[in-house]
Image (cartoon, helix red, strand yellow):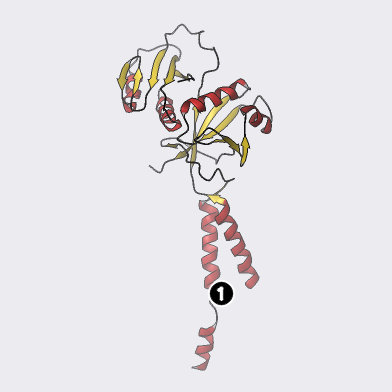
């Protein structure tokens, strides 16, 4: 009886110490590939990511309104390039928020430009 | 009378085992076995994404320093070598949420230049 509870206690300790309760997920970061962009005839969209809003082709809007603004574009045959530039002071959290929003929009090919 | 007292003196081993067994089952079912990440790393928080297995990937701290399995990594090329060389189809990065995004993009570009196919950013899924 004593050895049984010893073993169970050891197992309990092992699982308590080695398991994690965090839930992970992942999103693709489509960064610049070094000059693979010029092949398309479709004019690219230009998005500037700022600390408190985004500018799509110069129009400022909150991040929540971006999906609606991108969905209202005219239809194109192939994915339209979307170039993302960043101001200074943008954190990974902010960039990931943007990538999550863009992930739900069909028909665009986002590319994050470096050096912001 | 005397017999009742001797029964009450016995240690309740069965009840103890029951409780410990319940806790064991709970931790086995609810937890996920994973290699621990950096202790002071605060992951990017997201919602509305599907869950993934816990990552075993390149950790980038808020100041831009990289670690992999607790060992510091100075260049992205070293990491690519340690996980089996170029041509990996998918590379996962675990950035701190306060890491400047330009540094994250620069590291991703370096990995891409070294032959990585897709760069995935691992985040922590919110409860909402």
Residue drawn 68% across and 28% down? B85
**Quadrant in the picture for the C terminus of chain B:** top left
Say whether residue B85 is visible.
yes
Image coordinates of residue B6 in percent, x first then y, are 54, 88
Q: Using the image, determine if residue B23 lies above or below residue A114.
A: below
Image coordinates of residue B51 in percent, x first then y, are 49, 39
Which residue occupies the foreground of this view, B123 or A68? B123
Using the image, name the chain to which the residue with label 1 belongs.
Answer: B
Q: Secondary structure at mark 1?
A: helix
Which residue occupies the foreground of this view, A58 or B55? A58
Residue drawn 60% across and 20% down? B113
Residue drawn 43% across and 16% down? A82
How many callouts does the rendering have?
1
Q: Taking A23 as reference, is B79 left or right?
A: right
Q: Taking A42 as reference, is B20 left or right?
A: right
The image quarter containing residue A44 is top left
Image coordinates of residue B27 in percent, x first then y, are 53, 55
Residue drawn 35% across and 24% down? A67
Residue marked by disc 1: B13
Q: Residues within 10 Å of mark 1 (few under 14, many from 20)?
A: few
Which residue occupies the foreground of this view, A18 or A94? A94
Q: Using the image, determine if residue B91 lies above or below residue B126.
A: above
Q: Taking B28 as reference, is B50 left or right?
A: left
Q: Using the image, determine if residue A15 lies above or below residue A48.
A: below
The image quarter containing residue B119 is top right
Judged from this view, the residue extending furthest toward the bottom is B1
Judged from this view, the residue extending furthest toward the top is A41
Say whether residue A71 is visible.
no
């Amino acid at each position: 009886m004593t050895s049984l509870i010893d073993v169970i206690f050891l197992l309990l300790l092992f699982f308590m110490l080695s398991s994690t309760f965090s839930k992970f997920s992942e999103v693709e970061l489509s960064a610049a590939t070094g000059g693979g962009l010029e092949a398309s005839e479709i004019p690219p969209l230009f998005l500037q990511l700022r600390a408190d809003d985004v500018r799509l082709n110069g129009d400022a809007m909150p991040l929540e309104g971006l999906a609606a603004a991108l969905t209202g574009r005219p239809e194109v045959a192939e994915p339209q390039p979307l170039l993302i530039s960043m101001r200074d002071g943008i954190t990974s959290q902010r960039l990931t928020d943007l990538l999550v929003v863009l992930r739900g929009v069909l028909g665009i090919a986002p590319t994050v430009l470096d050096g912001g | 009378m005397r017999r009742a007292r001797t029964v009450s003196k016995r240690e309740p081993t069965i009840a103890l085992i029951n409780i410990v067994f319940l806790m064991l089952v709970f931790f086995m079912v609810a937890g996920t076995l994973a290699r621990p990440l950096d202790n002071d790393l605060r992951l990017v928080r997201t919602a509305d994404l599907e869950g993934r297995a816990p990552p075993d990937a390149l950790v980038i701290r808020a100041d831009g320093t990289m670690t992999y399995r607790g060992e510091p990594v100075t260049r992205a090329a070293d990491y690519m070598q340690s996980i089996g060389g170029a041509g990996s189809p998918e590379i996962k990065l675990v950035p701190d949420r306060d890491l400047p995004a330009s540094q994250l993009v620069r590291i991703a570009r370096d990995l891409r230049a070294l032959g990585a196919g897709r760069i995935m950013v691992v985040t922590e899924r919110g409860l909402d």
